[in-house]
Structures are given as structure tokens and as C-alpha cells.
Image (cartoon, rainbow, N blue to C red):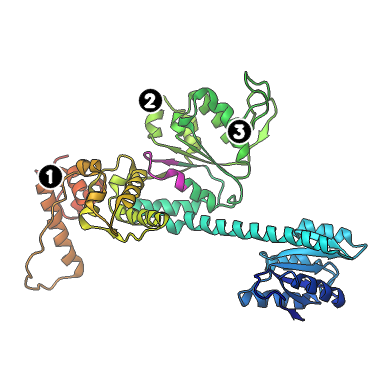
């Protein structure tokens, strides 16, 4: 195996490996490519080719393009391309076909080669083929980079939240993603239902197929059917050509229907049929299309209440309520606010090219106390505004919107640390229980024993407060209210 460095050493060229049993031909081709500024190497057999590819990657200088003979020795009669691409998928491959083996070269294209040349080759053919191979490799590298960024953005590790309810959401996403099961998400607008739907798709076997999203509330009722199922030419006035709907666009992938609560009764009936039978007809057509689609739905209103009011079909609700994911509003999980704020600040600081290192205590206290009617989406907008307006490296109160400061409720009460008390032998559990009981009791006193106000002040939900009051024997107090 002979290595031939580029003659134009100062010109950054591609790394090209020529694998051919005809060493004279390989040497001549290597010399021509080296004269164009490329680094060229020769491997006359399949084992030497695989060894060179592996060694080059280990050295941090992988082969960009492999020019490989279809009849390369050492393959035991098997097409060499299959093993090459399996072990080195980032290397673009051009196959060399001696006269009479063109069929094998064409088969190589089917297996993943980017081009093939028939011997004897001429300079113009080599240049054009090499150009196509390098463009394909650049496109592959870009796609891999985008995939890594997407993996990072949608990794379950990046979904932010420490509240037990959000941790449960992440567990459900992990559990349900590999299946085809219909998922129903509920939660107020802005809580991140779209992000969760993307994560379900991204961690499913359908991740390489389309993810199609439609907000049912943003489409007029008269257009929603054609938007979902498509239509054929002449189906209605203005239908001058066939148009595929969202179900067809999502074939093999995932269809996310947001604000399903806004769908009309007629549309609910059509959706029920599609979900049950996995088939549909475009508007104006009698041709049935199979729907290979994983369906994820979301509602920003309680569907149980809509069913009770007769505004949502009960049979559709039962059909889509297979796996239900409930996303709590941000105001009910204030412990997640610092985590989300830090994540958004890091993102926007990077986008702005600035070094922003955190928040002042007063700014963070204001962020924690705000009720966030727009939920996580509103918090992200607030942090983006603060990142743009901040003149230093730390976000202060003055960088926050005045409306946030005006709407934030009074600061939570603080219990001063008591002076050191004499040590009384006790278990750790007992030692921790008594301070918690005092904190809860004082908070109840400060709020006239109103449980909802007390829970809000302590930064916990009412259910958690109820459990702790039960643990500490506080439920029977005559002062208890609300």
C-alpha cells in the first residue's frame, strides 16, 4: 500500500483512496488526482482497503472519497460496497467497472455508491464524478450535523423540569414513543405540548419519516376537512388540481393535531373513523387511502368537561384517550422556573453572541412569583427580552417587563433561622419533621388557614399541602378554611 501526498501541499485538498488490483492504473490515477491538490493513497486489495479506512479515521484524517474496483481481490466474491458503507458511512464511494461488469456497478449505485466509472477512464469523467462524490459527502456531513443538533434539541435529557409531574411526563414519553399508540396531551396553551409531541416522534421508529403538525383552531371549519384529508380536482369551486392533505403528508410518520377540542362535531366523526379504520378518502374522491400515521393529539381545554357539555363526542374521546399526558401549568410548578429561565438565557445569550451568566436574586424572585398566564412560552419571551435589553452580564429586575413586576403577587414570607438550640437526641426523620410542621403551621396562620393561598405561598400544589397536613395532624384544626 503506497501513500502519495498531494504535490500542492499548500492547497487543502480531499483525501482520496484508490483501491484497484491494477497497480499501474491506480498509480496513474493517483498521480493525476495528486496534481490537482488532493492527498491520494493506494490499496490493491479489500483487506488493505478496510485497514486503511479504519486507520485514517483513527488518525483523524478520514478518507473523503474511495475509488474502488468492483473486482477488488479479497472479497470472497461478495460486493465490496456493502461492508465498506456499513463500517464507513461517511466516505463517498465511486465504483470502477471493467468492461463487461457494468451491471455490478449499477447494482452498487442501488446499494449506496454515488457514481461509477467504466475503464478506461478519462480526466473529464474522473473530475465530474469526483465533484459529484464530494458534493454528496458534503451533503451527508451537513445532514449528520443537523441530525446531531436535532438529537440534542429533542433529547429527553434536554426536556427541562424537576417537578414530579413533569418527570412523570418524561417517563411517559419514553414508554410510549416506541409504539404506534395514540397519545392525548392536555394542558393550557404554552405549556410545551408541541415540544413533547416532537420528542415522542423523535424517539420513535418513525423519526426518519415526516412529522406534520396542524392546529385545528387556526383553520376555518369549512377548510379543515380538505386540509386534513386533501381533495381532488373539481371537488369544489377553486379545486383546480389535486392536493394532498396532512394525513398523506405524514404517511409513515407522525401527525400532531393540536387544539383538537376546537374540531366541529362533523369533523370529530370523520376523525373517529380514520383513527378506528386507519383509512380515509380525499374530499370529492371515492378512492380509499390507507393511513400509516401515528396520531398525537392535544387539547387546551378539559375534554371530559366538553364531553359532559355535549361539545365533544364521547366515543371519540374514549378512542383517543389511550395514553394521556397531562402537562401542568407553569404557575403550579414554580420550582421549574429557575431551571427553564437558565436554559432560555443560555440559548438567547448564544444567539446574541453575549456572555450572560444569570439573574440577580431579586430578578429571580420576581420570575418565581409571576403567575405566567402564557406558561412556558411566555417565560421564554420574557427571558429573550431581558437578554436583549440587559447591559451587563446578569439579568436584573430592571431588565424584566414592568407588567411582570406589577402582576407578581407579594413575596412569600420568610422564616428567620432560629438561634442554636441545645441538642436533643432524635432520629433524622423526626428532626426534619418538626421544622416542616412549624413552617406549614406559620404559613397557614399567615393565610387564615386557607389551603389554596398557603399552597401558593409555599410554592407547592394543594394536593401536596394536603398530604403534608395529614402527616402532621393538621387537618382537624378548627381554623381550617378553603
Closest to the camera, between mark 2 and mark 3, is 3
Residue furthest right in the image: 100
Does residue 288 appear left or right of residue 164 in this picture? right
Closest to the camera, between mark 3 and mark 1, is 3
- Comparing 169 with 80, the one in front is 80
Q: Is residue 13 magenta?
A: no
Q: Which mark is residue 449?
A: 1
10 Å neighbourhood of mark 2: few (<14), some, or many (≥20)?
Answer: few
Q: Residue tagged by mark 3?
A: 245
Residue furthest bottom in the image: 1
Which residues are drawn in magenta? 185-196
Mark nearer the N terminus (2 vs 3)? 3
SS class, disc 3: loop
The quadrant of the picture occupied by the C terminus is top left
SS class, disc 1: loop
Mark nearer the N terminus (3 vs 1)? 3
Does residue 349 appear left or right of residue 8 in this picture? left
Which percent across, then down, holds residue 417? 10, 63
Amino acid at each position: 500500500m503506497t501513500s502519495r501526498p498531494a504535490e500542492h501541499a499548500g492547497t487543502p485538498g480531499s483525501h482520496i483512496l484508490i483501491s484497484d488490483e491494477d497497480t499501474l492504473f491506480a498509480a496513474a490515477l493517483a498521480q493525476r488526482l495528486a496534481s490537482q491538490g488532493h492527498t491520494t493513497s493506494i490499496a490493491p486489495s479489500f483487506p488493505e482497503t478496510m485497514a486503511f479506512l479504519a486507520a485514517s479515521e483513527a488518525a483523524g484524517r478520514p478518507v473523503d472519497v474511495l475509488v474502488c474496483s468492483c473486482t477488488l481481490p479479497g472479497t470472497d466474491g461478495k460486493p465490496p460496497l456493502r461492508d465498506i458503507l456499513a463500517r464507513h458511512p461517511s466516505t463517498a464511494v465511486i465504483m470502477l467497472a471493467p468492461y463487461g461488469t457494468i451491471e455490478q456497478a449499477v447494482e452498487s449505485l442501488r446499494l449506496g455508491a454515488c457514481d461509477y466509472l467504466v475503464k478506461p477512464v478519462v480526466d473529464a469523467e474522473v473530475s465530474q464524478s469526483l465533484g459529484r462524490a464530494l458534493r454528496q459527502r458534503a451533503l451527508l456531513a451537513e445532514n449528520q450535523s443537523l441530525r446531531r443538533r436535532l438529537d440534542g434539541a429533542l433529547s429527553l435529557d434536554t426536556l427541562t423540569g424537576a417537578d414530579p409531574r413533569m418527570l412523570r411526563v418524561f417517563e411517559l414519553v419514553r414508554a410510549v414513543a416506541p409504539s404506534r399508540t395514540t397519545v392525548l396531551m392536555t394542558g393550557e396553551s404554552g405549556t410545551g405540548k408541541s415540544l413533547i409531541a416532537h420528542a415522542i416522534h423523535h424517539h420513535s421508529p418513525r423519526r426518519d419519516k415526516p412529522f406534520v403538525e396542524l392546529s385545528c383552531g387556526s383553520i376555518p371549519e369549512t377548510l379543515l376537512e380538505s386540509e386534513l384529508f386533501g381533495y381532488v380536482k373539481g371537488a369544489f369551486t377553486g379545486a383546480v388540481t389535486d392536493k394532498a392533505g396532512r394525513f398523506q403528508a405524514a404517511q409513515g410518520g407522525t401527525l400532531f393535531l393540536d387544539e383538537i377540542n376546537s374540531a366541529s362535531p362533523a369533523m370529530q366523526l370523520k376523525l373517529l373513523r380514520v383513527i378506528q379504520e386507519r383509512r380515509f378518502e380525499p374530499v370529492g374522491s371515492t378512492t380509499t387511502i390507507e393511513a400509516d400515521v401515528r396520531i398525537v393529539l392535544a387539547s387546551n381545554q378539559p375534554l371530559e368537561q366538553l364531553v359532559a357539555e355535549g361539545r365533544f363526542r364521547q366515543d371519540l374521546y374514549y378512542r383517543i384517550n389511550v395514553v394521556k399526558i397531562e402537562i401542568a401549568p407553569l404557575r403550579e410548578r414554580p420550582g421549574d422556573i429557575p431551571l427553564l429561565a437558565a436554559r432560555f438565557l443560555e440559548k438567547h445569550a448564544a444567539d446574541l453572541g453575549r456572555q450572560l451568566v444569570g439573574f440577580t436574586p431579586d430578578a429571580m424572585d420576581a420570575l418565581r412569583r409571576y403567575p405566567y398566564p402564557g406558561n412556558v412560552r411566555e417565560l421564554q419571551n420574557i427571558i429573550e427580552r431581558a437578554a436583549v435589553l440587559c447591559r451587563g452580564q446578569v439579568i436584573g429586575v430592571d431588565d424584566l417587563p414592568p407588567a411582570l413586576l406589577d402582576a407578581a403577587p407579594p413575596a412569600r414570607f420568610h422564616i428567620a433561622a432560629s438561634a442554636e438550640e441545645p441538642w436533643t437526641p432524635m432520629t433524622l426523620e423526626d428532626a426534619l419533621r418538626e421544622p416542616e410542621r412549624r413552617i406549614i403551621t406559620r404559613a397557614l396562620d399567615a393565610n387564615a388557614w386557607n389551603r389554596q393561598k398557603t399552597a401558593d405561598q409555599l410554592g407547592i400544589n394543594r394536593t401536596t399541602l394536603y398530604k403534608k397536613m395529614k402527616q402532621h395532624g393538621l387537618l382537624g384544626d378548627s381554623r381550617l378554611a378553603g
